[in-house]
Image (cartoon, coloured by chain):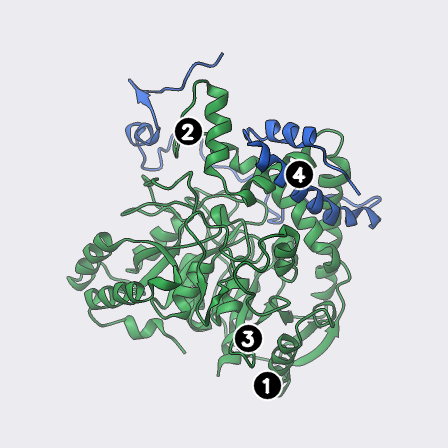
Chain colours: A blue, B green
Amino acid sequence: MTQISTDDVHHLAQLSSLQLGDAEAEELRVDLEHILGYIEQLSELNTEGVEPTYQVTDLHNVWRDDSIDDYGIGREELLALAPDADKNQIKVPKVL
Amino acid sequence: MSRIADFIGVSARENVEKALAKARENEAFHALLSLTEDRALERAAKVDAGEITGRLAGVPFIAKDNFLTLGGTTTAASKFLENFSAPLQATAIEKLEAEGAICIGKANLDAFAHGGSTENSAFGPTKNAHDQERVAGGSSGGSAVAVALDMVPFALGTDTGGSIRQPASYNGVVGMKPTYGTVSRYGVVAMASSTDTIGVLSATAEDAELVMDILSGRDRKDMTTLPDFFAPTALSEPKRIGVIKEFMTDDVDPEVRVRVSEYIEGLKAKGHTVEEVSLPMVKYALAIYYIVVPAEVSSNLGRYDGVRYGKRAEATSLSEVYGLSRDQGFMPENKRRIMIGSYVLSSGFFDAYYLKAQKARTLLIDEFNKIFESFDAIVGPVAPTPAFKLGENTEDPVKMYLADIMTVPASLAGLPAISAPAGKTEAGLPVGVQFIGPRMSDATLLALARQGEV
């Protein structure tokens, strides 16, 4: 059965952009190990030569006209949703 | 039988006022997160003045709180979107409003629709309509309880792995999960794009049929929608129905088996041919589901970054905005799914988990296709037990996932499935029966459920 270390949890948290607390990381470590233990049963299944399924609509390349449609929402309304915006731009703290 | 019919041709204002009063009387169940009273009364006035007409003129309904609606907040039962007011409405809401229906409130759910009990709501669980010590089921638990308590004749839900059918079963109402692509998902909070569907919970199958007729059809805002194929149908001839052997084993609660068996006897009595069928791949369906869905969840929930909308955590750098906003905005189950998704998609594990699951999914679909060469529909329970106690499965995520074991197969294959009431246990807890049919057989499943109500 797959073992998940504390380092693994922090690596997964980083991949997932989650800044976890230590107690929370330990709880998640136990849960993730348990979930992976369950889903690993698939390894007993022979899938050699089977094509994977990625979607179930049978639709292919649905085209539309190359025209602009704002779907009835304006820039102002969208900017108003941002926690911090100024002069048509969304503001965030420094990147580096 | 129609409950919707009782609301047509009478005062829309009275309909709305009664629904709001019922919602308030039943606050203890915590089925709703908010009421959209002002907008509902405004729309009712327009219906009463004859300005809005249609097949649902003046009929009140409730939407799960992951549908974007005007006139209030859309929270997805999360801290992230606690104060989020959408600037637009979901296509499903627009279509119902165009027929005169009136949204009176937003229903509780597991945050971001991740869960099977509505206990993962950031605002507290919904209680079962028949026993307040038990779960509502989920993730559309609030919608199911609102209908079961007759606040409204129908409610909208979403079903990615059973989130309409399982709470419908736990609360004794009808729950329709249509063929993948039947209803536009535009304006609905995305969970797992390859299995997300929108459907209805209602008092009767006839009501679900009417609402599905209105909701179905192609939407240029959702390119995965199918051309409108849905047309209500009557059962002109007896159907060939298979009973799923793997769903009727000793692992299933005996009272659930008895109620479902009685329902099946009723099908025979109505002239349908009933035979046992075997779907050996359903044993793996839950494992496939808990690889494919977290993978898609981890990708879909990447958009919640605290930058463009939703709650932003106090932070001194951009990476902290992401990391802390996501840590504070998501519930533990959201984080589990995101991290499992990151795991199964990481290089080195991709082939062993994600690719393997997508191949196994093909095998499951092949099995369904083979069965539907000889059967019109298959039948079985919706869930292995009636509603469980609040808190009973919260310690162990896998135990909670097992409540979805009978609903995920149809989701992975994109098939229509319906949960219909099949009576109650000795203790008075509802039990549901599930029909699953080939793609686009939605109307036939509804006709079967209608026949079972008579």
Q: To which quarter of the image does residue B31 belong?
A: bottom left
- Please tell me the numbered disc located at residue A29: 4
Disc 4 chain ID: A
Q: Which element is circle 4 on?
A: helix
Find the distance from the CA under tag 2 to the CA under tag 4: 24 Å
Q: Chain of mark 2?
A: B
Type of the residue with mark 2: Ala
Indicate the secondary structure of the residue bearing disc 3. Answer: helix
Answer with left or right where residue B266 lies relative to residue B286: left
**Residue B40 located left or right of residue A67:** left
Separation of disc 2 and disc 3 at Cα?
A: 50 Å
- Rendered image quadrant of residue B193: top right
Q: Residues within 10 Å of mark 3 (few under 14, many from 20)?
A: many
**Tag 1 residue:** B270
Q: At 49% from the left edge and 51% from the top edge, which residue is drawn? A: B110
Tags 2 and 3 both on a single chain? yes
Query: How far is mark 4 from mark 3, CA to CA?
Result: 46 Å
Q: CA distance from mark 4 to mark 1?
A: 53 Å
* Residue at the image position 59 percent from the left and 49 percent from the top: A57
Q: Check disc 2 and report the residue beneath it.
A: B313
